[in-house]
Image (spheres, rainbow, N blue to C red):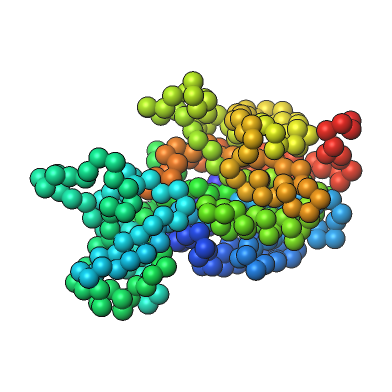
Amino acid sequence: MDFANKGFLMDLLTTPSPSSNEMEIQKKWMNYVSDFADEIRTDTAGNVIGILNPDADFKVLLAGHCDEIALIINRIDDNGFLHFEKMGGINPKAAVGMRVTVLGYQNTMTGVIGVNAQHHGGIKDGFDLGDLFIDVGCKTKEEAARFVQIGDLAVYKTEPEILMNRYLAGRGLDNRTGSFLVAEVLRLLKEKGVQVGVYAASTVNEETNMGGAYFAAAGIMPTMALACDVTFATDYPGVDKNKHGDVKLEAGPVLAKGAPINIKINRLLEKAAEKLDMQLQYELTPRVTGTDADKMRYTGRGVPVALVSLPLRYMHSPVETVSLKDLEDEIELLVTMISDLTGTESLKPLED
């Protein structure tokens, strides 16, 4: 990954993008993609879509969601402490003692998630988010209310880091890496040339309701759609591989297999991997994928979908970790598969 593109990725990762408030990151994504897209579209959900060959009949939609999990303020107590609920899959145990950035309606503030000292009994067994609070340094409810109101959001305050020039660690890699990835696929396809229409969408709201993906697919009516997300790596201590599968960093992109997935799109991806001599991994999604693919599939007359994922350690924790090699491999895989499309392919499983 060259320095300029890595800089764009780091810019995305340092931009707060809680589900329902993705505007700032979307503006940055749109500014980057506008340099090479033939057309840019936005919609009422908040998606940004970069397009190549908008007049082509065969349309490929790539969806990478830009939103991250967050905390939503639901109460300010008399002493100025902020209480919250989760916006997406927050793990209460991982939140304890973390610093957060509160995106107040008047100010952006740093806070800490308070924890009862072990000397005073520590945290009770079976605690949940309702037992935690954010301390922003205010002394009264009135003081805090000058900066923060009910419904404001907060995200973990961490910075992305490169580990051993090999791995990327940071907050919200799920799935701002996917938003980055679909932009890079579009950029490289513009350079390489492509015969089909390509719609790279930085989607919103995946962590809460996947509504962004539905709006994107309903508006585009694609011939096929690929969700570009992350999946659970199981290559670190404490994970039961017999239960959760064997997925490793630096072992290649992960294709989903199961009822929602169009088998012919998977074959096209596997053919591209063979051409590149690239290793692939697999995960099972028997009923649903739990990603944007599920909503895109049910738009219009129905959309054939596939799911291509980046192996990720420590899902929904304050610091997730992926491999830079896997990220580059997934970009190369998608560029190769899409650039090889002629626009005459049938995605009906019963047709040769």
Residue 132 drawn above or below residue 262: below
- Hey, which quadrant is residue 78 in on the image? bottom left
Q: Is residue 11 at least partly visible in the picture?
A: no
What number of labels is visible? 0
Q: Residue furthest left?
A: 119
Q: Position of residue 71 (x, y in %)?
A: 39, 58
Q: Quadrant of the C terminus?
A: top right
Residue that appears at 89% across and 43% down: 344
Residue that appears at 66% across and 50% down: 295
Left or right, 31 with reference to 266: left
- Hey, which quadrant is residue 23 in on the image? bottom right
Q: Residue furthest top?
A: 242
Residue that appears at 62% across and 65% down: 45
Q: Position of residue 263 (x, y in %)?
A: 75, 33
Residue 103 drawn above or below residue 184: below
Left or right, 143 with reference to 148: left
Q: Position of residue 55 (x, y in %)?
A: 85, 60
Residue that appears at 78% across and 54% down: 300
Q: Position of residue 94 (x, y in %)?
A: 33, 45
Q: Nearer the viewer, residue 143 or 108?
A: 143
Q: Is residue 15 at least partly visible in the picture?
A: yes
- Hey, which quadrant is residue 216 in on the image? bottom right
Left or right, 202 with reference to 82: right
